Image: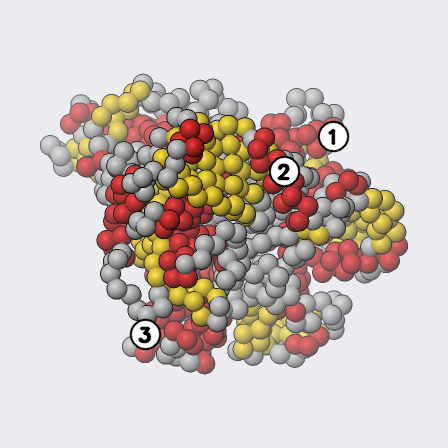
Amino acid sequence: MRITRRHFLTASIAATGGILIGCDLNGTPTVQGATNGIEFVPNAWVRIDPDGRITAIVGSSEMGQGVMTAIPMLLAEELEAEWSSIRAEFAPADKAYTNPVIGQQLTGGSAAVRGFWQPVREAGAAARMMLITAAAERWGVDESTCNAEKGEVVHPDSGRRAGYGELAEAAARLPVPESVFLKEPDEFRILGTSRARLDTPQKVDGSAIFAQDFYKPGMLTASVVRCPVFGGKVGKLDASAASAIPGVKEVVNLGDRVAVLAEGFWPAWQGRDALEIVWDEGDNSGLSSKSISRRFREALDEGESLRSEGDPEAAFERAEQVIEATYEVPYLAHACMEPMSCAAEVREDGCDVWVGTQAQTRTRETASRIAGGLLSRVPGLRQDSVRVHTLFLGGGFGRRSEQDFVADAVELSKRVGRPVKVIWTREDDIRHDYYRPATYNRLRVALDGGGLPAAWSHHSAGPSHGAASNMGGARNLPYSISNLEITYASVDVGVPVGYWRSVGSSQNTYITECFFDEAAAAAGRDAYELRRELLTEHPRHLRVLETAAEKAGWGKSLPNGRAQGIAVVESFGSFVAQVAEVSVKDNKPQVHRVVCVIDCGQTVNPNTIEAQMESGILYGLTAALKGEITLENGRVQQSNFHDYEMLRIDEMPEVEVHIIDSDEAPGGVGEPGTPPIAPAVVNALFALTGKPIRRLPIRL
Amino acid sequence: MITITVNGREQQIDVDPQTPLLWVLRDNLELTGTKYACGIAQCGACTVHLDGEPIRSCVTPVESVDGHSVTTIEGLSGDASHPVQAAWVEEDVPQCGFCQSGQIMAAAALLEENPTPSDGDIDRAMSGIVCRCGTYSRIRRAIKRAASAGEA
């Protein structure tokens, strides 16, 4: 056990008569509220009911990454609860659930466990200590003579025991301890062990509720048509045919988009097809992938410096050999399986939003801004009267941190005075994403007389969600190279961009790790051995790299026509190396096997880590083999899964995951599996064919 | 008026006969376990059984199933006890979960027709159902687990 000065904690009596332990990371208590008829202290992290049931209240969003199991595991560990007595439910939007790593209630950046590792364990520990105190007081014994184990407080000297449920109300009346004792890692019995996901039962019987499924009486379903050209507006609208369709209730012109609201999705969809809209396409109607690429290329030399070490210019001057290449990556859509959807009800006394969102803080702000004019008529009702009910996310990958679909629902409910559910079509989803940025890159490497890289230069240009975040995976190049220059030129071309699983690392790891292999080949070196030589100052990179090579049998003989490629990267506090084994059939790459090694520090749920590595690999591999959003006449040319293709089960390689045993601080797992797969596959193809692949998706 | 039997219950449906079965299930019968994800039979999230056969409900006009029997995820077992659902729990298959109703309905239909599928059989039966989360390896394992449970 070790003592820690805790974050701000609160305790109160639950409506059920049990205890609620809250954890407000901002240090100020928040008001009580009610959601959906269930009484609720908004900042609670755990509720213990008199019947002994323990509910972990999860402020992070479950989009498949397993957070609805990981957070409860953190709680249960310190609470000394029986795992089988733990349930999980979603928290409301409340600043108590602000992720300390991010500064908002937002699930992204693989930050949930990293952010809540300490405060949630503290909440569990405080509850445990209060339950022990309550039992000691009841029995008239010193609390130091009592222990907590498996959901009970025991007094070994007398053999007395009491369940948490029966102690909960008495514990709730006690002051929260000033400091709490946290377990040492060698005392963990839940953390680091594989646990089945708590949300699996709901996801195998169809009962899990996504925003697409939400319904309340009186609700209309809306389909929203946006201008096919980004930034365009409605010019002329003729809604007469649409309004005549049975079931269509309203057509609303929102200026830059038109919504058809109906009794159910089908009439809404038919209604949108019947709309006659002349768009004012604005300034972007001439955009094409070709013109965008040219603008990036022209901006290449005007980038902002993100890293500069040594004297690259001089090093290139005196180099024995200079290798230069240009790399390009396309825009990518997220293509979550659930197209964007959101339900909202704006009333004079408040606004409710039911949504699978990654970003509760922003959702609340969006709803407050849009509904605000109406809400302000009631004194004292402003943001606090906006309640966000988080539902399951049918995929997130960064897309569900955006606000466009939330704005649709809130705006429409405000206009029509009824609850409204917006369901985007797949076509809307593909054509109106916040895309992963396309970039154009020029790389140079100088080799010295011994074939070692003496200088590395990477100039990149593309649209920006922040140059530093755009260049994740490039600016943190881990190799010992004395002279480096890394720049990014931000060029806004009017295509919306956003965060896409693993952000900059998703594309830059491909670019840097593949160019590295080109350099190794030019120097006549084995790509793996050269990495080892240049990673001596980065032991965690080196360890995953060497483990991956060993597990994959790097350098050993392979079946005819197959080759291996390797890549290593640090992202979101974790280190991942992958070895891909590929062949080519009918001029198409076949990926047979991927060995993946991750060092994510101390682990929470190895079951989830393994699943997230498979997940990240599938996501990155789909992009590498198939993903490309192109533009012509200002329009995205892809629209659905027939022309924006997804990897299917018959294309899924065999994936083998190894987790490094580590006592380092926890790292992320939702994203770090994605970056290495594209370069591992491309490097394998380079080894097989001798031809570098300098743009994605891979075309042989 | 269209009559269909859904999960064993006869239902009278009064909608535009062209309405896809998917939206009748979701909006009229409040069976939301069956999902909309593409609307053009490209992803299989809307897979249900029509007289035991897997179909894409998003492109199936409800009039074309008049008089027939439909099973959705909610009616596959009623209590998640179907061997495929049990295997899905054992292998902890779902991630985001959105595609899983379609995956489970496709897998159940596969095993009904072929109780001991090979990897190739699984590929053929399941490649129509897209998962973005990467649950394919576990789906494969769960189908094999359900198959061997059926053999025992």
Asked whether A293 or B56 is in front, the reply is A293
Residue sitting at 48 percent across and 71 percent down? A586
Give, as a three-letter code, the residue at label 3. Ser
**Camera sees residue A264:** yes
Q: Answer yes or no: are tags 1 and 3 on the same subunit.
A: no
Left or right relative to A698: residue A421: right
Q: Are marks 2 and 3 in contact (CB under 8 Å)?
A: no
Chain letter of the residue beneath label 3 in the structure image: B
Left or right relative to A290: residue A574: left
Depicted A71 relative to depicted A484: above or below: below
Asked which secondary structure carries label 2, the reply is helix
Depicted A377 relative to depicted A558: above or below: above
Inter-mark Cα distance, 1 to 3: 60 Å
Image disc number at residue A374:
1
Q: Quadrant of residue A461?
A: top right
Q: Which of the two labelled residues, at mark 1 and mark 2, occupies the earlier sequence position? A: 2
Left or right relative to A29: residue A570: left
Give residue A631's position: percent from left, percent from top.
68, 51
Give residue A526's position: percent from left, percent from top.
30, 51
Chain letter of the residue beneath label 1 in the structure image: A
> Where is mark 2, residue-wise?
A298
> Where is mark 3, residue-wise?
B148
Image quadrant containing the C terminus of chain B: bottom left
Image disc number at residue A546:
none
Give, as a three-letter code, the residue at label 1. Leu
